[in-house]
Amino acid sequence: MLSAAKEKRQHGSMQVPYSYYDCRMPDYFPGVPLHWHGEMELNYIKRGTGYFQYEDRLLTAHAGDIFLIQPNLVHAILPAEQESMFYDTIVFHKNMLIGGYDDRSYTEILQPFFSARRRIQAPISSYQIHQTQELQMICSRCMKPVVLHCRELQSRNDHRYP
């Protein structure tokens, strides 16, 4: 793994165990350089087109796509030429998904996923799933409480907000 590419930003805190980012390329930043971190990352493409680089694979991102990035996976997010891409990102510690280390779902599904012995197919694409509206509704329901919570903390200038 590229030690120089390890991200130095802390995502979340003990009180708020995740970070939410409202991302707009190129409006807010030109792209996300190649990096890795020990947390999980969930990206939902709201609008536009761009690229996700997973190690040596370059994948096209379209509105409705979901990119789940495993811990310690080298990745980058790049703009498409003459395109904008708006997306939500939640970076969170894998412990948010763990009920208990002796739980069967942890030992058989999550632990191999966290250790990269099992890879997820990326992206989870609206083109591959026939129930696109249902998928978008699920993402919206999952993201909405996190987004609202982060906005509330931001509006209060809460010191715990990452």
Image (cartoon, rainbow, N blue to C red):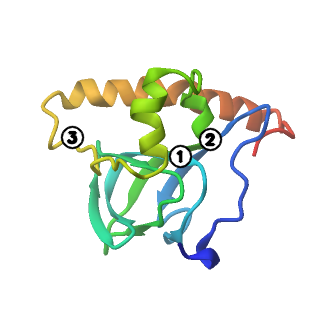
Are circles 1 and 2 on residues that touch, CB within 8 Å? yes
Q: How far apart are labels 3 and 2 at the CA level?
A: 26 Å
x%, y% of residue 24?
48, 57
Q: Which mark is residue 126?
A: 3
Which mark identifies residue 40?
Answer: 1
Q: Could you tell me which residue is drawn at 42 percent across and 43 percent down?
A: 113
Q: Mark 2 highlights which residue?
A: 93
Q: Residues within 10 Å of mark 3 (few under 14, many from 20)?
A: some
Front label number (3 vs 2)? 2
Does 71 sit left or right of 52 as displayed?
Answer: right
* Label 3 close to label 1 by CB (< 8 Å): no
Packing grade of label 2 (10 A; few <14, some 14-19, many >=20) is: some
- Asked if residue 80 is positioned above or below residue 70 in the image, the reply reads below
Camera-side residue: 76 or 31?
76
Q: Earlier in the sequence, mark 3 or mark 2?
A: 2
Q: Distance between the Cα atoms at labels 1 and 2?
A: 6 Å
